[in-house]
Image (cartoon, grey):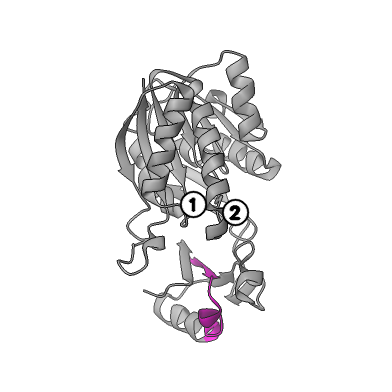
Amino acid sequence: GLSGLIVDRYGEWLIVQFTSQALALKRELLCELLAEKLHPAGIWLRTEKGIREAEQLEISDGLISGKSPPRPLFIREGNVQYGIDIVEGQKTGFFLDQRTNREAITRLTNGHRVLDLFCYSGGFGLHALVEGGAKRVVAVDVSKSAITTAAANAELNSIADRIHFVQADAFDELNRLERAGERFDTVILDPPKMARHRQGVSKALGAYLRLNAAAMRVLTTDGLLVTCSCSGHVDRDQFRQMLAQASLDAGRPVQILESRGQSADHPVSAHCLETDYLKCFICRVA
């Protein structure tokens, strides 16, 4: 119920983010209460990109109390193991809010050839292989460190022989795959936030449009598109309309099978619709 405060728990460690100046000014009290209630081994502060300038915050990443977390820190989600970096990794080290969406795709990917774009530490792709019975995954990310982490996680789960990693820009790689005539049974799109303020919504929708249309063009007939947006300023209706236009641009009819959001431990406030920030549509592309 405290808008502007994020607390992610990884085993014995808490990762805290402040996205409002009002709550950041109360950080000592809030962290004392967290330590008192949860008794973590340590509390680490992470700052979101651009938030210090936007909220005039005088804070920086670092240990607030207790011990520093190990690097990597090993976690388990279902039957999948991950080594993650909660000190310098994206967001707070892992995308916990996508947990139920990763679980959802495992019902659909048996025997599939999967393209996992913006794969980061391997979340969706590893679940498709370990729990979903996918035949093979091509995982793409522009970040060298993300690819290194994801490859280590593939080794950790003994599926490195069924996943191929590519360090590349997702738009460029989609264009290359289309030119090469590559086709996939499932394409997963989980890009980073594309609109950090309302003025950026139009540009973000244009990027989503190009990305989704390109993904549709490399899908097999009746293939699955799992497409996500974590931009709170892009609402669900806008994202659905973008998908409709992408369908026309690609010349591929699209059916939305599931309209999903973030996991239940990231609740949506009826008074702040931007808390319904994560959109995850599972679609059939004819």
Q: Residue at x 45, y 78 (%)?
A: 34
Q: Which residue is mark 2?
A: 90
Indicate whether 174 appears above or below 117. Answer: above
Q: Is residue 233 left or right of residue 264?
A: right
Circle 1: element type: loop
**Residue type highlighted by circle 2:** Gln
237 vs 122, nearest the viewer? 237
Indicate whether 41 appears above or below 220. Answer: below
Q: Quadrant of residue 281?
A: top left
- Location of the N terminus by quadrant is bottom left
> Residue 163 location in percent, x, y?
55, 27
166 vs 127, nearest the viewer? 166
Q: Are marks 1 and 2 in contact (CB under 8 Å)?
A: yes
Circle 2: element type: loop
Q: Residue at x 41, y 21 (%)?
A: 252
Q: Which residue is mark 1?
A: 95
Give the distance between the C-alpha atoms of the residues marked 1 and 2, in whole angstroms: 8 Å
**Is residue 268 in the magenta section?**
no
Q: Can I make out residue 158 in this image?
A: no
Crowding at dot 1, Cα within 10 Å, few <14 / some 14-19 / many 20+, comes out as: some
277 vs 251, nearest the viewer? 251
